[in-house]
Image (tube, rainbow, N blue to C red):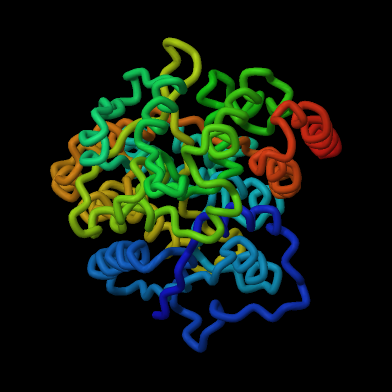
Amino acid sequence: MTTTHFDRRTLLRGAGALGAASLALTPTGCSSHDDDALTFFFAANPDEADARLRVVDAFQRRHPDIKVRTVLSGGDALQHVSIYCAGGKCPDVMMAWDFTYSGLAERGVLLDLNTMLARDPSFAGKLAPDSISSLYETFSFDGGQYAFPEQWSGVFMFYNKKLFAEAGVRPPPGRWDEPWSFGEFLDAAKALTRRDSSGRVSQWGFVDSWAPYYSSMLFGMNNGVPWSNPRMNPTHLNFDNEAFIEGIQFYADLAGKHSVAPNASESQSMSTMGLFTSGRAAMVLGGHWRYQTVVRAKGLDFDVAVLPTGPKGHVAQSNIGTTGLAIAASSRHKEQAWQFVKFAAGPIGQTVIGDSGLFVPVLRSAIESAGFAKAHDRISNLAVLTGGPAHAEGLPITPEWPKIAALLDRNLGPVLRGARPATSLSDGLSQAIEQVLRAA
């Protein structure tokens, strides 16, 4: 199988293209002379692909009668799977993303897994008490369960312990219920930013390896305001909320006002993860998908920390950021697909994932297992990972998200570049989103 690098920034930007895939394109990859094989579509970087293949191998050892053919996505996974399904070649099992699956569910592409759970009470009885409700309910839409969560991909901070110690800065908290204010975070970033004799930055206090648009909203949420009301089928997004806007502005000012982070143009010409792994950045915002890159960096003494918050007493939150496994409603292999999904998202498959060290599993038994701890023995603040899923708030779930994502792309860019204040979002962006939601 050829492995293609999967960039989450590409995925998040590609969310606006979901449903826009040209129906004239001829889908490839899911067609085969072997029509009896179960097709499994996923997106992954090389390390992630390796972990998924371990799950597939473990499944096939237990189910030698079910052949699985893996289909690895290209750069834009959402458009890729839309092309397949539009051409009548939906994969039997496919990855589902928290912020876009509802559009596929609404169009009847995904099978309601409640129909399978009703026929398998034994598995249902094991899954429910072991699941983390916020992750499981992320894939519940309009009364249906359209995917089972398979990994937690929320973001947090990686930090360089050596640089903190050299600067005499206290390390950030390693538990989600320990406070770390925006002010304390900014003070640390300032103390950890270094410049050479010419004034050029030689060491950044903070860099972002996620998607800046979403990161800025995460700071808005950690200023005490949810992304939307309600989360499922929202009627309102909080871009007109003063505290939410203040959080976005705080994030934008890290680069534009305080110069403790690269600005938009600088970020385009450098690898933010490269800055961190080479010791030229003290903190980086990212998710567990960056763990293998960090752990393999020569001589890097690192740990993980929670995100900073605005209001006093407010518990830090990550984004839910989960992916799930769904079954195509048109699949001719529903029973085989069900066996695969419940294996991968159930206790055995989640234990394989936890032991691999490449994902954060979603079942309590796997998160709390000795294998998961052993796979992360370089991390002292393991509670950031084990407690992350329970301290996470998700993006809005709506079939209209691709349209909203396109509006975010146009309106948040000028704010993050410093061309407009975040207060500008309360007018144009907020009103445009309201129109999209009303028209739904």
| Quadrant of image for the C terminus | top right
| Quadrant of image for the N terminus | bottom left
Residue under the image location 71 percent in, 43 percent down: 408
Specify whether residue 217 is in view. Answer: no
Residue under the image location 61 percent in, 64 percent down: 330
Q: Residue 182's spot in the image, x, y percent?
A: 46, 23
Q: Looking at the image, which is closer to me, 135 or 289?
A: 289
Residue under the image location 41 percent in, 45 percent down: 286
Q: Residue 206's spot in the image, x, y percent?
A: 42, 40
Specify whether residue 293 is in view. Answer: yes
Q: Residue 13's spot in the image, x, y percent?
A: 63, 54
Q: Is residue 396 above or below residue 290?
A: above
Q: Looking at the image, which is closer to me, 86 or 50?
A: 50
Residue under the image location 62 percent in, 18 percent down: 243
For the view shown, which residue lies furthest in the front direction? 197
With 130 as the anchor, is 241 left or right in this view?
A: right
